[in-house]
Amino acid sequence: MRVNLTVTTKTKSKHLSTFFVVAIWLALATGLVLSARTWADDTSKVIDIGSKRELFVDRLIVDELNGTSLKLHTPQLMPPVSPPRPHGHYATVLKTADKFQFYYRGDTKPGNHWKQGWEQYHDGEVTLYAESKDAIRWSLPKVGIYDDHPTFPRGNVVLMNEFLVNHNFTPFIDTKPGVPDAERYKGLGGLAYQPHKEHLEVRTRRGPGGLKAFVSPDGIHWKKLSEEPVIPEAWGKYFDSQNYAFWSESEQNYVCYFRRFINGYRGIARTTSKDFITWTPFVEMKANLPNEHLYTPCTQPYYRAPHIYIALPTRFMANRGSATDILLMSTRGGDRFDREFTQSFIRPGIGDKGWANRANYAAIGIHQTSATEMSLFLTGGRRYSLRIDGFVSVNSPLTSGEFTTRLLKFTGTQLEINYSTSAAGKILVELQDEDGKPIPGFKLNDCVPIYGDHIARLVEWNGGADLGKLSGKPIRLRFEMSDADLYSLRFQDNVLEVR
């Protein structure tokens, strides 16, 4: 990294002060950007990826980039979806085998504001529900759980009269093996009281804050799993964000990422649980750059590679009218997010609307909505599309470049890639042994040239695509690329035909 810094100061001490501030900032920022690279310090260590799909949102499998680079891709704004248009900031989109389910906040008093009275404001909040077959055209079903309310004549309220919970109720589909049918859906919601008179008086009447747990067989009919908060209010400072939990197959735990103040700035903490009731002491995630607020964790397993958690937090600019944009981070567990990219992932957009106070919050939910695209959802009924696996690519210009992985061990007989080239571009793949020597039959000049644009394409050499004899052995992948993007790769067992 090279930094050009020009500082005009009146005194030597001021110059030194500025120097140290910049030095500290760079050290912290570089530490965050390089967080995944710490996994690659020992390049002789073999990474067992089995048959898991690997993306390039971090550098776990990346060794050398020669003439290539990691490229962050920008989601494309699509036409607005039909209702719902969330009143609240914290929305969740779930996907079942036959439908999408949308949860969002409403209020029994349209236009209500906490400045009109904190208790009555939260008393009026409800959780609303919508359904869709395609995540674009939504219906508001009459679920018949509560008496009709004039503000919600379609009767799509699924949770009401749960003080503080409805402010940010965030459900998920529990994929833990053996979970009872009655608890197929779970969710958390709640706030913590602030340390001033009004809140303390309310707490005396209403009981402690914190995150309360709910369960449901269908995502519509909810009941408390526990009367007491399962995550105490002291952990959150104030939980006024979207605090999402999920079952992690890779960690064999429930994991929850929640909002917390860290050194005076909005940040993210994490806790885990075996039973969704008893949670481990939280850890504060290493995520914020200096003087940076991250308002919502928005951390979730990526549906095609659930061992990788994708985070779409809100960056909050308090001194710019509370403007917000969306970042891209990732983690595989532990106390650190990888921030390979510190720039915005989704900007506020053209016009004043996106620059309003807290106008940009990503919903929980990254879902496939066509054969080639996945969708992200933001407040205000906005939908963004992105190529499947298309957060980040290894990118090469037309002049050609190379990308080499670390030593890998895999399971399977085929190498599948998600890639795109220009009409003039191409990709060649070579397999190398642990000493970096090309493996006979799988050299660069043995590879059938790859060009085109496929979500799933097998790599083929003159001898075919079968890699069975190399399964379980340490290898490196070397890609020679020209005007191309590589989005993901995985090894598998005879699933695809060579294309």
Image (cartoon, rainbow, N blue to C red):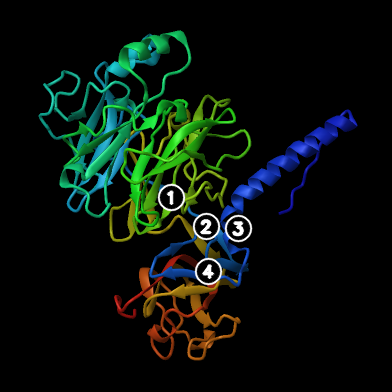
- Residue at position x 56%, y 52% from top? 340
Indicate the amino acid at tag 2: Asp
Name the side, left or right, on which 439 lies relative to 490: right
Is residue 8 among the parts visible in the rendering? no
- Along the line of sight, the residue nearer the viewer: 259 or 227: 227
In this view, 57 is above or below 50: above
Q: Which of labels 3 and 4 is toward the front?
A: 3
Residues under numbered marks 3 and 2 in contact, where contact means CB atoms less than 8 Å apart: no
The CA span between labels 3 and 2 is: 11 Å
**Quadrant placement of the N terminus:** bottom right
The CA span between labels 2 and 4 is: 22 Å
| First in residue order: circle 2 vs circle 4 | 2
Q: How many numbered callouts? A: 4
- Count residues near mark 4 (Cα–Cα under 10 Å), then give few for <14, some for 14-19, many for 20+: many
Q: Which residue is mark 4?
A: 483
- Count residues near mark 2 (Cα–Cα under 10 Å), then give few for <14, some for 14-19, many for 20+: many
Helix, strand or loop under label 3: helix
The CA span between labels 1 and 2 is: 11 Å
Q: Which residue is mark 2?
A: 58
Q: Which mark is residue 310?
A: 1
Q: Which of labels 2 and 4 is toward the front?
A: 2
Helix, strand or loop under label 1: strand
Is residue 451 among the parts visible in the rendering? yes
Q: Which mark is residue 38?
A: 3
In this view, 350 is above or below 100: above
